[in-house]
Image (cartoon, grey):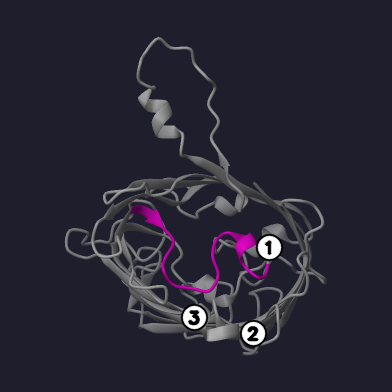
Amino acid sequence: MGAGLVSLPSLASAEEHPNSVLTALSPTTISGFVSTSMEWNPGTGNQNLPLYTPNGASSSAKADGFNLDVVALTLNKPVGEGEWGAGYSATLLFGPDAIGFNNSAGTVPGDFSLADTYVVLRAPVGNGLDFKIGTFAAPVGYEVYQTGSNPNFTRSYGYEIEPFQLTGLQMAYQFSQVVSANVGVANTWNAGINNRAPNAESYKTYLGSVTLTAPESMGFLSGSTLSGGIVNGYNTLASAVETSFYAGGTIKTPLKGLSVGLAFDYECIGANQVAGVMNDSAYQYAAAFYLLYQATEKLSFNARADYLSQSTFLATTGLPAECLALTGTIQYDLWKNVMTRAEFRWDHALNGSDPWGPLPSLDNEFVLALNIIYKF
């Protein structure tokens, strides 16, 4: 994503020293993107679609029409030089895909949210220990909120069942070019700035992950990554303790431009209460396989096959107990700074007793989408 230095006008001043405010702002960069889409869902009854949006909201609002998805604006200052460097990042989201993503606790979700908004502090410990304080993406999962950074436009089942934004403290350390890790503590398992668990004084959410990156000495595998992570804490939406496990990575192949991706998510949901009714503990898991081919500098082909199984509808209302999806995406970047993608997706409910619904009862859903993103 391109970034431009914040430009400030020259100010005539008799002062000998530069203005402290201007000096502080000068390293700040502004970047972001505007995402739009067009979707066609063949057939009728498109009010009951699978979940493939970035915020877990109903996909039906985007069916059979033109959409402004989201506008993202990021202000960023990298960690400064020196042993005690500091920096910050603030991403502001506007539009339908921002609704409910990460609003302040107790507020009514609106068309504005925050993502990855934090202060970074570096301590001179070994190679440098970074502390991230604020709200940040959960360290688990193959896909991310920024749709242009994913191989496909629609999200996988694994993304839908993962925690995707936390508020707390995270510590990151780069052991070497091969091994990096982070650990942290947050308020709750689910998104919501300043959310609190019922017993907030003593109960928090804990997280950690490890990433391995293949060095140049490994030939065609150079740059391949493997990672695993865990997030355990209280989900205020499900009124239950939830534990998420993730393992996955992207492996390069001997064929130039071809990579494969693997992702596995597993969730344990403790005994919970929904609408005043107690439910037993449950599970959810999702597996995905990605085939990624960069044919030319501008042309790429990406395919994904993913599968979901769950014992409850708690966290993914609108998904059957067992389902799969096949997604194919063609990307061609004709205009400068513009990502253009055409995508076809087929979702199939494997358990006939609970297809996409409740009404109409359909075992299959299809979507044909065009996604256009301008990055700046």
Give whichever of discs 2 and 1 has the lower sequence position: 1
Q: Is residue 285 left or right of residue 190?
A: right
Which range of residues does the magenta coloring cover? 133-152
Of residues 26 and 64, the one nearer the viewer is 26
Q: Position of residue 17 (x, y in %)?
A: 35, 20
Q: Position of residue 35 (x, y in %)?
A: 68, 52
The residue shown at (55%, 79%) is 222
Give whichever of discs 1 and 3 has the lower sequence position: 1
Q: Is residue 12 left or right of residue 193?
A: right
The residue shown at (44%, 49%) is 103
- What label sits on residue 214 in the rendered view? 3
Looking at the image, can residue 81 be seen? yes
Q: Position of residue 188 (x, y in %)?
A: 33, 62
Give whichever of discs 3 and 2 has the lower sequence position: 3
C-alpha separation, residue under disc 3 versus residue under disc 2: 31 Å
Mark nearer the viewer, 3 or 2: 3
Q: Is residue 299 left or right of residue 131?
A: right
Amino acid on which disc 2 is placed: Leu
Amino acid on which disc 3 is placed: Ala
Q: Residue furthest top?
A: 14
Q: Mark 3, residues whose alpha carbon is within 10 Å: few (<14), some, or many (≥20)?
A: some
Residue receiving disc 1: 60
- What label sits on residue 324 in the rendered view? 2
Q: Position of residue 276 (x, y in %)?
A: 36, 68
Q: Are marks 2 and 1 in contact (CB under 8 Å)?
A: no
Disc 1 is placed on an element classified as: helix
Q: Mark 2, residues whose alpha carbon is within 10 Å: few (<14), some, or many (≥20)?
A: many
- What label sits on residue 174 in the rendered view? none
Disc 2 is placed on an element classified as: strand
C-alpha separation, residue under disc 1 versus residue under disc 3: 41 Å
Disc 3 is placed on an element classified as: loop
